[in-house]
Amino acid sequence: MTPSSERSPSIAAFDCTQWTQLLEFSACEVFDIMLGTRLHAYVPSPVPDDDEFTALVGLAGSLCGVLSIRCANQSARIMASLMLGMPPEEVDNDSWDALGEVANMIAGNFKGKLSGIGNHCMLSVPTIIVGSDYKTRSLGPGKTLETVFDFDHKPLWVTLELHD
Amino acid sequence: MSPIRALIVDDSSVMRKIVERSLRQAGLDLSSVIEAGNGVEALGLLDSNSVDLILCDINMPVMDGLELVRHLQTIEKLRGVPVVMITTEGSESNVIQALSLGAKGYIRKPFTPDQVKEHVLPVLGA
């Protein structure tokens, strides 16, 4: 039987602390370059109930898993307004599109920072979930990296679930 | 430089608008911009529109960007139109594949207007 480290080079290279930092850096870079805004660590505070959006991007190949970003409806609207340079009230369905594209760029940016691994990993087109009453279930063992940012005084979750 | 007719191919309408804005910020005089959400839509538009430049994502439904570039090389009137890929798929293997298929440039997302300028102007001979 092949040892697991040989079967899955991506998991063999996995370093939770380092990869979480890379994930944070990848997200910060996307927001800095494409939205012209800086992300900061989220300080928990009472958050009014708001509809949520989640964008999912699948990874397949040397890295298998799902990258997701989750935020309030209003946060996604502000992201779109910053990307498009228009007032938030003029943003319509573009907020879904913007969130998906941000997820896509964070995933691509992250895998690009994993030397020798990201070259053999493909991304799916993004999927958007509207609402927060849902569960996801992985079909195999894996690891989860998660980081929470403050975006417009609301939490923005960036999560990477990796499968063995 | 004479006015440019551009085709932007990306499944994200937000990204298409950003790319158009970046082209204008790069100093390009755009006489027309047409948009497609995937490779098949792009080929349909190219049936009835002439363009000087194509900017193209890779990951798209229906027909992806690499397949589109492959198709363009088989159509004589489109073979000479420069294609610049703008994509999150920025691995070396993707870059090599796109360039070997006929793309003239490659921009990784996220990108700045300066990067668009740096990669687009040379393929237009500017």
Image: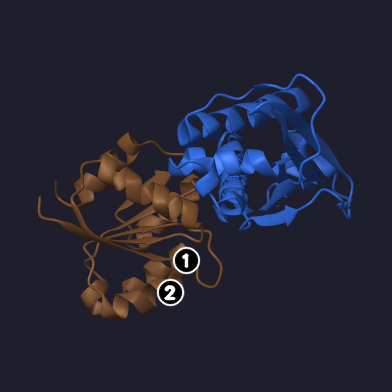
Pointer 1 with pointer 2, Cβ within 8 A: yes
Instruction: Kindly identify which residue carries mark 2.
Output: B41
Horizontally, is A159 left or right of A86 in the view?
A: right
Q: Colour of chain B?
A: brown
Query: What amino acid is at disc 1?
Result: Gly
Along the viewing direction, whichever of A5 and B104 lies nearer the viewer: B104
Q: Secondary structure at mark 1?
A: loop
Which amino acid type is shown beneath numbered disc 2? Glu
User: Numbered disc 1: what chain?
Assistant: B
From the image, state the color of chain A: blue
Q: Measuring 46% from the left and 59% from the top, which residue is drawn there?
A: B10
- The chain letter for the residue carrying disc 2 is B
What residue would you read off at disc 1? Answer: B37
- Residue A108 position within the rendered picture, expressed as x and y whole percent measured from the top left: 57, 44
x 48%, y 41%: residue? A87
Tell which of A26 and A47 is nearer to you: A47
